[in-house]
Amino acid sequence: MRPWETDLLLRVQHLTMRFGGVVAVDDVSFEVGRQDITALIGPNGAGKTTVFNCITGFYKPSEGMMKLTHPDGQSFNLEQLDDHDINSHARVARTFQNIRLFQGMTVLENLMVAQHNVLMRASGFTIGAILGIGGFSQAERDAVDFARHWLDRVGLTRRADEPAGSLPYGDQRRLEIARAMCTRPLLLCLDEPAAGLNARESDGLNELLFSIRAEDGIALLLIEHDMSVVMRISDHVVVLDYGKKIADGTTDEARSDPRVIAAYLGVPDEELPVIEREVGL
Amino acid sequence: MIPLSEPGKSFGQRLKSALADAIIAGWIAFFLFSLLLGVRTVDKVTGLTLAPRPGLLAIAVGIVVFGRLLLNLFVWQAEHPITTPFAKLFTSKQFERRDLIVLGSVAFVSTLVFIIASIVHAAGFQLVAACLLAFLGIGTIRRVIVYFFPNLPYARIFTIGGIAFAILFPLVSYLLEKAFHLGLPLRYLFDLSILVLTYVMLGWGLNIVVGLAGLLDLGYVAFYAVGAYVFALLATHFGLGFWMCLPVAGIAAALWGVILGFPVLRLRGDYLAIVTLAFGEIVRIILINWTPVTNGPNGISDIPKPTFFGLPFSAQASPNFASFFGLKYDPLQGIIFLYYVILGLALVTNLVTIRLRRLPIGRAWEAMREDEIACRSLGINTTITKLTAFATGALFGGLAGSFFATRQGFISPESFTFIESAIILAIVVLGGMGSQLGVAIAAIVMVGGFEALRHTAGLQSVFGEGFDPALYRMLLFGVAMVGIMVWRPRGIVGSRSPTIVVHDVKPIPKNLVEEARA
């Protein structure tokens, strides 16, 4: 029994996504543990982002099942939920490969928008707040406090009133993570969080991700190209190639798997038959 | 076409390139104007013939050539463009000696010209000199105020001053007129102010949809029409009063907004603009053809006026407003009341919008304008958010429509053509999408300024007695719009203010802010 199978958060079964004749994801199954940092890796075009988009509801999978179980036993079939319900009910948050911040809004406003559903209920769906009944101002103060907590965590408190679009790239990455965390998720999906970061920023990111798992008890699922990041922080690696899962295990297992090496580095022509025999093709 | 200014160039070189440029521009002007101005069709017994107008053509081409030459020499290619000192009046940049000399000499010459023109009764020169002096005066006053009070909240002062003026203007001018018999055209001024305020309200209403939610709506006039017709039908068929029908009309328009919103939810940009345009036309065509209900193109007449807590303003009614308060009857009282009704409605629109912007729904609208996909990833139901934006915008459109119906007393589908939607959208775009103050200024400039061009007797003294400024309104209007879009492409108010802050309020430059676009 693998550690991620004992305390399961998300079970993806036979996930298939077809775009016309193209099979972007082909019968992929894997598990995400509640205590783990799970990395989804693979060469370009392997279907990682498609899997992400299926889990977070931006695509409806052609086949397969994705079952997410909350600690209280309540479970959600993600393939049946709308994208916004996946965030608000199933409590899965995500970031994007090309950062999608609200550029013309301030850093703080970005984090306030992330708490929309909580604030919307507190404002009596706007009507209460306009009439001045209900506890909206208290709820708003709480939301600001929560946002400031996350600004402190990602080191952006000083820049809270600046427009998000004017932040440097590394800060924008961290702000996007903070914004996703402000939706109070149980599973945080990060699409290439370290892309475009320098070594120092990348180290800072690793620390942030560790602290999210340790302090907030939130499972992380990330797509990453930077192998140093993947190998350092993840507990569980799922490797995709051409839409198929080719490996699933700990970082050490993935690192030594000949199919993973072949997928990443390719093999010389003369060794091809040997490798093929080894991996059973 | 515009050569870059190169500081190292000698005067001879500059003159040469400026001449070459002016000659090319002259040729282009000649070809363009040769048919537009150079010939005129004359109806003769022999049939339609062309009469050449070489003089006019020469004047037009001459203006282009010399204008271009002067611009090249003194502005575009000049080391110290002659326009810089004037531009500096409206910034906080340091003046150099050269700037002061230019400004001083222009002021001196304008004053001289003004005095001489006043003596010899050359109204044209007088007007030009007066405009120049006014421009310099405004700029100087601005510099002086900013110099002594650099940190005043100017936008707030401007807003409060504007609202105070709007509240006091009709009463004060009415009382002054009654007391001193100044002969002010009060009836006309009040009617124009009511028209301007109606557009301010419509602009603020559409600003919710276009400016905040980023949904380009070309059919806003449909909601205006729904509000107007709902009120008119309820009033004429069931004898209900304005205040009773106002909320009903608003809610009906909001419902219409939701109905319109549903099918267009998936659309963005150009597609949304086209479908909303079509909806606007559909509403108008239904109004024309559904004769049993709407009375078709003949419209609905005898729509009642609003009452002051049950007191009508008409002379026949008894008791009416004047007799109840023991005043002398005056038709202006009713108009002033209408003015305050629309002022109140517009301010309510504004206050609700300002409040909504600071509530989660308003932030969700703005977030949706910035990035819809990110919104959905944060658990925001963009379907509902879009529908609320459409409904809220439509609500205010419907309220404005009811007011329009009660003011006019008569409505027909003619009043709800596409050009109305286009004017309201132009107000929002020129004002700076999302900015309340900008939209108000744009409505005053667009509607009030457009109207003011009717009364430019001064221009007649420049261009001769045969010149009818009303004919050139559209042209001047177009030039003004092009000017604003060249110099302030993000509208009159080119920044967004944050809805919540930790430390201090800093306006956000508009180049970071998304906007509705096709």
Image (cartoon, helix red, strand yellow):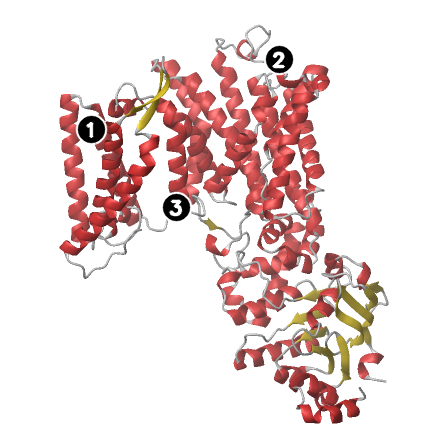
B317, B301: nearer the viewer: B301
In the rendered structure, the residue with mark 2 lies on which chain?
Answer: B
The residue pinned by badge 1 equals B125
Q: Amino acid at mark 1?
A: Phe
Residue drawn at the location 72% of the way across and 76% of the way down: A242
Secondary element type, mark 1: helix
Q: CA distance from mark 2 to mark 3?
A: 46 Å
Task: Using residue B504 as the reference point, say whether residue B313 is left or right of it.
Answer: right
Residue drawn at the location 39% of the way across and 28% of the way down: B473
Secondary element type, mark 2: loop
Task: Give the residue at the far front of this rendering.
Answer: B46
Q: Which comes before the other along the chain, label 2 or label 3?
A: 2
Task: Using residue B181 as the reference point, say whether residue B76 is left or right of it.
Answer: left
The answer to whether marks 1 and 2 sit on the same chain is yes
Q: Amino acid at mark 2?
A: Asp
The residue pinned by badge 3 equals B486
In the rendered structure, the residue with mark 1 lies on which chain?
Answer: B
Task: Evaluate if marks 1 and 3 touch, with contact meaning CB atoms under 8 Å apart.
Answer: no
In the rendered structure, the residue with mark 3 lies on which chain?
Answer: B
The residue pinned by badge 2 equals B302
Query: In the picture shown, does residue A50 fall above or below A139?
Result: below
Residue drawn at the location 65% of the way across and 20% of the way down: B232
B122, A162: nearer the viewer: B122
Q: CA distance from mark 1 to mark 3?
A: 29 Å
